[in-house]
Image (cartoon, rainbow, N blue to C red):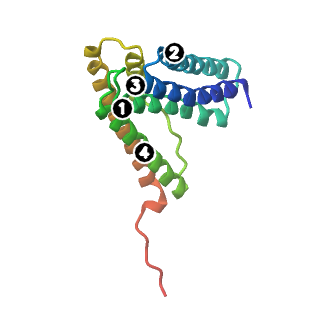
Amino acid sequence: MTTANKVTIFRILLVPFFIVQVIYYNRTGNAVNWYCAIASFFAAAVADGIDGYIARHFNQRSELGAILDPLADKMLLISGIILLSMETRYFVRIPLYLTATVLSRDVILIIGMAIIHYTGTKFSVRPHLTGKIATVLQMATVLWTLLKFKPAVLPYITIPAAVFTGVSGLLYVFNGMTHLNAHPSSGPTTPQQP
């Protein structure tokens, strides 16, 4: 359990706190819950940079960290996008097309990874530039909505976010299919002679 992994676990523990604060603010309009939601989101984002810095500069990369770090990012972003796309009096809603695109991509990726694991194919997921851009735009969407900036600008963030999310998902699917096609189990089965 490295220091970087402890910071990542702290980020994961911030997610339920963030969720509760957003839900309470949506229900009551209490500004304290709003401030706590913003603070927890910012703390998780800053901790993301800290654990990455520690892992790189102190040689604390680990297999556990390779799993926990993207998991922490996904939990925070997906919970924020889902919560802020719900009906509320206090936030501008994140468009459902972005929510549907993000969720669909991640479900397809999980199913694809399960299939690849089942076939015994060795496949390492390498992030594409489009995926990194999609993550930055998703983060910007959540922050823009949380901070209640100008609603008219939001589509200029959410539309590119949805496009890059969809394209990155297609690239992952294409790469996964390429690896599966190269695996012997993907070929036709020959009937056994009696």
The residue pinned by badge 4 equals: 107
Percent position of residue 82, x then y: 40, 33
**Secondary structure of the residue carrying numbered label 2:** helix
Percent position of residue 105, x then y: 38, 40
Seen in the picture, residue 1 relative to 173 is either above or below; the reply is above
| Residue at 48% in and 54% down | 115
Q: Which mark is residue 115?
A: none
**Secondary structure of the residue carrying numbered label 1:** loop
> Which numbered disc, 3 or 1, marks the residue that appears first in the sequence?
1
Distance CA(mark 3)–CA(mark 1): 16 Å
The residue pinned by badge 3 equals: 138
Instruction: Name the amino acid type tagged 4.
Output: Val
Seen in the picture, residue 194 relative to 108 is either above or below; the reply is below
| Residue at 55% in and 55% down | 120
The quarter of the picture where residue 50 lies is top right
Q: Nearer the viewer, mark 2 or mark 4?
A: 2
| Residue at 32% in and 25% down | 93
The residue pinned by badge 2 equals: 32
Percent position of residue 185, x then y: 47, 62
Seen in the picture, residue 94 relative to 34 is either above or below; the reply is below
Apparent side of residue 148 relative to residue 49 in the rendered image (left or right): left
> Which numbered disc, 2 or 3, marks the residue that appears first in the sequence?
2
